[in-house]
Amino acid sequence: MPDKNIFKKYFMHHRNVFFQIGIFIFSCILVCLAIGISIRFGASNLTYQQIWDGVFHYDGENFEHVILHELRFPRAIAALLVGAALGVAGAIMQGITRNALASPSIMGITAGASFFVAIAYAIQDQPSFYQLIAASFVGAGLSTALVFGLTAVSRGGISPIKLALAGAAMTALLNSLSTAIGLKFDIAKDISYWYAGGLHTIQPMHIQIAFPFVIIGIILAIILSRSISVLNLGEDVAKGLGQRTNRIRVLCTIAVLLLTGAAVSIAGMIGFVELVVPHIVRALVGVDYRWIIPMSAVFGGTLLLFADIVARVVNRPFETPVGAITALIGVPFFLYFARKDGRSLSCKD
């Protein structure tokens, strides 16, 4: 008969893994719950019977069934997709920069994507979604290059505080230029959606186009997760362990651009998800990015699903921009970390 002490020792040795698996299972259950609530509640609530009939006995002439398939399902999937993309993008940036304040919105990447979307509207009256997503990727890439380039050539090189300051300055500049473009070309109403951030205009086509970019970005992040964990220990340690740090950063940046560009093209500037989620995940599963990356995807999707639910029901039948809801959550986090001393800006824990 097996010795009970063997099982006890095995459990104690792997208790962190069991806890992490438990958190992952719980978070997946939470995602399913959030999707169910998102489908049911909105400007007009659907009953469980209507949802059941709409899924298994679809009738194209039934108004509730049309709402379910054309609005509720795409919106829930989009919220999950965008939240996952932003959560993973934030985790990657905080890992490779060792900066607790690093995120696509604070580092100017989101603002760059939205700036080029504004340019697309100024050049063409009604740009297609393909043009908007291309503009979003180009803007995210150029903004990233500018922030890291300006910081790298400064005295002392790249540091967490310099990246945060350069990103904040770039965000302010690009937002001002976008506003000027909106006023000059009379497209302020068109681009206001991107700045408010929301999912009310989601169509199935948007998800079909953006889905591959998000999936590729997340898969690339998972492949790089072990290298990100090593890089998070410090440049010298990573090089000593044989890591090609420059190549890792380039690949991580590509993943961030794919995720951020796709997210902005779908939902506009939804901030603070990418800042808050990695911190919550690190507090739960530790500092191993092999866990942080997938958990950030799950928690990011869950957070945005619940934020979108609140945005729909808090002022029915009108909608509150979901970016405002995420800001209410994220601003206290940002202020908390901004108040702490410079040593706490590192994510090495």
Image (cartoon, rainbow, N blue to C red):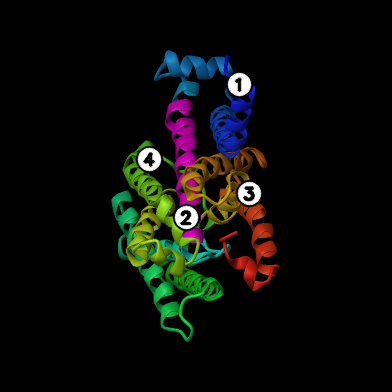
Q: Quadrant of the C terminus?
A: bottom right
> Which of disc 2 and disc 1 is earlier in sequence?
1
Residues under labels 4 and 3: Cα distance? Answer: 31 Å
Contact? badges 4 and 3 (CB < 8 Å):
no
Which span of residues is magenta-colored? 67-95
Residue, disc 1: 3
Residues under labels 3 and 2: Cα distance? Answer: 15 Å
Q: Quadrant of the N terminus?
A: top right
Residue, disc 3: 283
User: Which label sits in the foreground, 1 or 2?
Assistant: 1
The tag on residue 229 is: 2
The tag on residue 207 is: 4
Measured as percent of width and height from the top left, residue 66 is found at 44, 25
- Residue 343 magenta: no
> Which of disc 2 and disc 3 is earlier in sequence?
2
Residues under labels 1 and 4: Cα distance? Answer: 53 Å
> Which of disc 3 and disc 4 is earlier in sequence?
4
User: Which label sits in the foreground, 1 or 4?
Assistant: 1
User: Which label sits in the foreground, 4 or 2?
Assistant: 2
User: Which label sits in the foreground, 3 or 2?
Assistant: 2
Residues under labels 3 and 1: Cα distance? Answer: 34 Å
Amino acid type of the residue tagged 1 in the rendering:
Asp
Q: Secondary structure at mark 4?
A: helix
